[in-house]
Structure formats: structure tokens, C-alpha cells
Amino acid sequence: MRHHHPTILKALIITMLACSQTAFAQNADGPVLRSDNIDAVLNAMTVEEKVSLLVGGAGTTPDVPNAAGYTRTLSRFGIPLTVLCDGPAGLRIDPKREGTDQTFYCTGFPVGTLSASSWDPDMVERMTAAMGNEVLEYGVDVLLAPGMNIHRNPLCGRNFEYFSEDPVLSGRIAAAYVRGVQSNEVGCSVKHFATNSQETNRLENDARVGERALREIYLKGFEIAVKEGRPWTVMSSYNKLNGEYTQQSRRLLTTILRDDWGFDGLVMTDWGCKDSTVKSAKAGNDLMEPGFQREQDRLLAAVKSGEISRAELNRNVRRLLEYIVKTPHFRNYSYSNRPDLQAHAQVARKAAEESIVLLRNENSTLPLKGNEKVALYGISSVDFFGVGTGSGHVNMSHVVNLQEAMTAAGFTLDEDLAEYYRHCYALQNDKERMEGSSLDKRHRSEPEVSVQAIERQAQNNDVAVVVIGRIAGEGADRVFHDDFELTDIERELIQNVSTVYHKAGKRVVVVLNVVGVVETASWKGLVDAIILPWTPGQEGAHAIADILKGKVNPSGKLPTTFPVNYMDIPSAKNFPYRWNPSGRRGERPNYDFTDYEEGIWVGYRYFQTQNVEVSYPFGYGLSYTTFDYGQPVVKAGPDGFTASITVTNTGKVPGREVVELYVSAPSGGLEKPDRELKAFDKTKTLAPGESETLTMTVTTYELASFNESTMAWETAAGTYKLLFGASVNDIRRSATYKIKSPVNKIVAK
Ligand code: BGC
């Protein structure tokens, strides 16, 4: 039951509601819905029918058992039921169904954080085009993804579903994700809007965020995703924002999302509506999910009493109808239930290859030759984590583990050691089954390996690879001890393996199969190489093996900072890790409310500006080759500038390079981070000696900071420094760009 989604019970209870969905279909005289007669249908609908469309349901639908949710049918208008299921690492549906031997597995793709590590929106778009095909072919209309909350703190239990600590990287990857999925003419639901940065008390926590941080950090990514990705739907979050549930915030869901950003789609709640359904509907939250009878009752009463006006009701219903006419169910798409899982496995593998980050590679330890004898340590080499748990889990037919992948790649594994880990894993599994417990732990218990055994293994093998695993998911945040920090046994394993292998003149590689950032500063110096695949999907282990043997040259870069100490992170003092349960209800810091006291100083914006040492900086990642950055050329345009830079592969093997464009704003005016990411691009695979010119465009608006006293996006006049980096603190070239007079864009309050 390890991956049991917490809302399933709730879903089962309301399955019954699905049966009542035809209650309004007595009259078969309605105009049949078409994309060009929405007004006519709206006019012909009774208030009850309208209200029924605004409240969804969850559970078994005729097409997809245990779907996360659906919208209701109104058969007299030919309005079909539409089906909503989770992502983001792939489609989450039940793999088995009663009465058939057919299976309904889906592909487990790299999780959000690994996708963002690619810094390659085009690749992400190709990946999610395959993912969206599974949505379509399994009879689903909307994928409840991408998740794009900001990595405010590394202990958020769902960070793996999310992309980055930076809104521009998050926003551009999210937009690409949406375009890929929606190219199949199915929808996305960008979530969780907004400030859902922790899992602890996630239904009630009040995120207290200043206006500037809200606009620049927490909303900016959504803004980019909405404008560049045009998602069909957005999911409001469970939490409160500055005292108000986001699903009830007119300011968020209408003033900002629709009026300011131009969003023209549907807003649905996360999977639990708050009591004031009426307030949500008025605020512009069109669809209540999963939806209960009581929500229909409330809406109906409010329409009858006039609390919800006809215009408001029609506005929301119209959005539902506009959504419905786009869906495969409306088009009567005859789905196959047989997507090409083999082809998609290859897409998932390729995506992992393009995204995995090489953190350390002393004395060119990697790549290996590929025919070495390898001692592979760590129970995660067997129980490899492809994706996280909770609603972000995917029911895959298999997850390739590193033992299998390395063997397939031609390495010879120390078979005794491999068998030892398989045995320990089987024992742990049996124990869990007998006790009925689940692995909602943060990692498996790491079996001990004695120094004598390591000495023997070091004699018999050429190299050691140690896998460290971490798992997490919806419903709980990670913790500091034995999670962010390595456990004592893991530490001892790395220590002993390093000492013994180094004495024998042999190398040690660590693979971090982790859902989120872990502490690295205290032990990284012990080992020769570190590979960071995060949780790379069902085929990711193959990509790691190919990187180990040099068949693939890594080109991923960090979307999030690895700090030296947890307490270095500005949000650390305002995160549930410090939650005190004995406080008074409603007043418990980091539980009932969380102060985003650090404001805009999230991730590298803080570390870089304050010169705080980090273990691995934002944007960092090594390659097996080297790149030269030519002198950039900057051209001012009517609105901002275009910068081109030529990158040359100066090493010996083919590779790809990400160029990150940071901008330092002129001083004066608002206090600003030392530098901020404004654009990035990635080369194609460059052969040794080959060059490519990358071109990046930045608009005046994108250079702006938010002034909360004037409620304006202000682009100050002066000289902007443009920094072209291989990471946030590895700037290879710079240029300048001048703005003569300030540009301000005032937004509605
Ligand atoms: C999660 C969402 C998910 C929904 C439906 C909620 O509990 O927060 O991310 O889409 O359930 O499963």
C-alpha cells in the first residue's frame, strides 16, 4: 500500500455520486452542445443543471476506475462526463481492472525537478507529448499537472513534483510541459495555485507572504506558464494565502490570473472544497473537486437567494462548457487503452539522459570504460526510486534498478554483493507485508557492510558505486535528521568504502537517487564522483549506467541550490521542521501559519547576494567536455534586448552546454538580488570543435521588480549587467544594456 493516495477513501465514498449524474437528464429536449452554441445551451439549462456542472466528483467512471475526479454529464445537452487524473511524472491510473487481464500501466517519466535539470524546454515538450498521448489513449481528458510550486525549502515533501527555486526556470519548463501534453488535445491543470510550499497542515496552513515576494517569486512562474503554455485549467491550492483560502481569493483567481495575465480557462479546486463554496464560486473558482452534494446545495441556495448572481453563475458555467467542448470525451474520441508504452519508455530514458546532473568528477574519474568490475553498494541499487509517492506517483509496469541497468550496460557486478542487497530488500519487503506497514519512511534501512567485507570487495573489483536513496510525497514534509542529512549507516558506508578503495588505488562514485536536496558538504570530499539523477523515472537507471560508461555525456544543471548547512537557508527558521505541536490552535507557527519572512531571498537570490558559501550552486553541472563562451553580442530592441553568444566545444567528446543569462540591475530604487536568471538556452550536441550561437531575448517587463508601495512593476533606468554563466557563480562572459528612462506597469490591487 506504499503508494496509496490519501484521497482514495474519500473518492470511494463519493463514487455513489457518479450514479446520480444523470438526475437532470429527464428532458431530452435540450440543444445538443457544440462549440458554436454555448450561449444557446446556457440559456436552455435550468439552475440545477448549471450548478451540477460546477461540482465534480471522484471515483469510478465508465472509462477510468478510481479516477482522481470528473465533471458531470448532462445528457439532454449531449454533455459527456470528462475525466481528470494525476500527474506530473506520468498519468496515474489504476493498472488493473476487474473482469479483465488487460493492464493499464503508464510510463514513469523523470519527475519535475529532474525535468527542470535539463534546462531544455524543447526536450520537456517532447517528453510530455508522449505523456499526453497516454492521457488521450487511456480515455482521460485532463492531466492534473504540472506541479510548479517554488522550492522555497528543500524539505517540502512534494518538491520532486515541482521544478525549481527560480520562477523563470519553473515557468519556462512548465509552459513547455503544458504545450507538450496539450498537443494531444487533452488538457493540463497547472497546480497548486499558489504558495503551497509545504505539506505539513497543507489543507489549512496560511502562507503569509509579502506582496513583492508573492509577485516576483511565487506567482511569476505561474504567470509565465499561463502566458506561454496556455493551460486549459489551473488548480487552486488547499492552503490560505495571507489569511484567505486561495480557492476563495477573487484577487488571485480573477484580478491576477485572468484580468492581469489573460488566463481564459477553467479554475478548479484542489481535492477538497472549503466550506464557503459560494465564496469560491464568486471568486472565479469555477469547478469544485472532487465535489459533494452539499456543495451543489450551497450553490443552489446561493443562486436562489441572489448571493450568486445569474451573471456569476453563467460566467462559471460558460467556462465549464468552453472546457468541455475541447475534450476528447466531447469529441467522442475512440481511445485505444493501448498507448505505445515501449516507445514512451525510450522517451523517458532519453529525457533522463538529457537531464541528469554530474556534481563531482575528480581527476576525470568518469566516464568509466564500461567493462569494469563494479561493487555496487546501497539498498537503493535494488529498490531504485523512479518517482515519489502520493498523487505524484505513477503506476508503472516496472522501474529499472541500477543493478539491472549496469549489467545491461556491460559492467560486471560483484554478484555476492548484489545478491546480499537483493536478499536484504526481500527481507524488508516481507517484514513490511507481514506487519502491514508501508514504506512511508524517507528511505529504506541501509544494511551494514563490514570493513572486512569492503576490503575483500575492493580486492575483487575495479570501482565502487554507492547509491543513496530518499523518497517522499504528498501529505508529509521531509525532515532534517536521517533525511536531509545522511543516516549514520550511509555516512559510515561512504566513509569506509572511500578509505578502503582509495587505499587500494581505486575510485568511488556516489549516485544520489533522491526526491530532494540532501546534505553533501560534509562527505563529498571523500568520494571521487557524484551523479545526481534525482528520481529519474522508470528508465532513469539506464541513463545513469550510460553516463557512468560515457555513452551519454551529462548536460543537466541544478535547478535548485545545494546549501552547506540546512540552517543556512533563509526559510529554515520558518518551516515545519521547527513546528511546535503544543502551541494554541490557530497560533502554531509553521503549522497554522508560516511567515515567508525571507521575502524574495529564496535560493541563490540569497546565497549569491549575501556571499554565503554553498555546496553546489544553482545552475551548476559538469560535463565530460569543456566549452568556450565567445564574446556576447547584445542588440537593443524596441522592448528589451536580444543577446547572442557563441559556444564552442573545446574538449574531446560531444556534449551540450546550458548558458544561463543572469542580470544585475543598476543600483538605486528597490533593493535587488545581486543577479537574477532572466533567460537561458542549451546547445544541440556539439562535436569537439563545433560551435553554436545561442540567442536569448529579454523584455523590459522581464527586467522589472515589483514595488509594493506603488503596486507597479518597475524597470529602473540605468546600466544592466548581463552575465553569461555556466552556473550562477561561474560567469564566463558579460555585457551591458542601458535603459534611458524608467518603465512602470501598474497593476490592479
Ligand atoms: C493533491 C493534488 C492532486 C489531487 C487529485 C490532491 O490531494 O494535492 O495534487 O491533483 O489530490 O488526486
Image (spheres, helix red, strand yellow):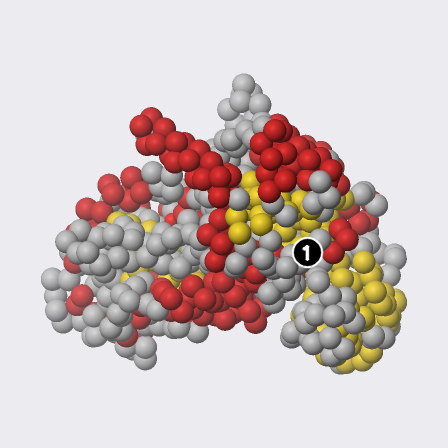
| Up-down relation of residue 740 to residue 138 (above or below) | below
The image shows residue 722, relative to residue 145, as above or below, that is: below
In the image, what residue occupies the spot 23% across and 56% down? 61
For the residue carrying disc 1, how many other residues have a C-alpha within 10 Å: few (<14), some (14-19), or many (20+)? many
Residue 511 is situated, as x and y percent measured from the top left of the image, at: 60, 47
Q: Give how far across and how far down residue 45 sits, in percent.
A: 23, 65
Seen at 77% across and 75% down, the residue is 648
Q: From the Cβ of disc 1, is ligand 1 less than 8 Å away?
A: no
Residue depicted at x 47% and y 63%: 348
Q: Is residue 187 left or right of residue 621?
A: left
Number of callouts in the render?
Answer: 1
Quarter location, residue 28: bottom left
Q: Residue furthest top?
A: 582
| Residue 451 visible (yes or no) | yes
Residue 228 visible in the shown view:
no
* Quarter containing the N terminus: top left
Give SS at disc 1: loop
The residue where tag 1 is placed is 366
Quarter-of-image position of residue 667? bottom right
Please identify the quadrant where the C terminus is shown. Answer: bottom right
Residue 316 lies left or right of residue 577; in this view the side is: left
- Horizontal side of residue 327 vs 706, given as left or right: left
In the foreground, 728 or 209? 728
Residue 54 is situated, as x and y percent measured from the top left of the image, at: 32, 56
- Give, as a three-letter code, the residue at label 1: Leu
Task: Identify the residue shown where x is 63% and y is 40%.
Answer: 459
User: Where residue 153 sits: x, y (%)?
Assistant: 63, 42
From the viewer's perspective, is residue 218 above or below residue 29?
A: above
Q: Is residue 466 left or right of residue 734?
A: left
Along the viewing direction, whichever of 36 and 393 lies nearer the viewer: 393
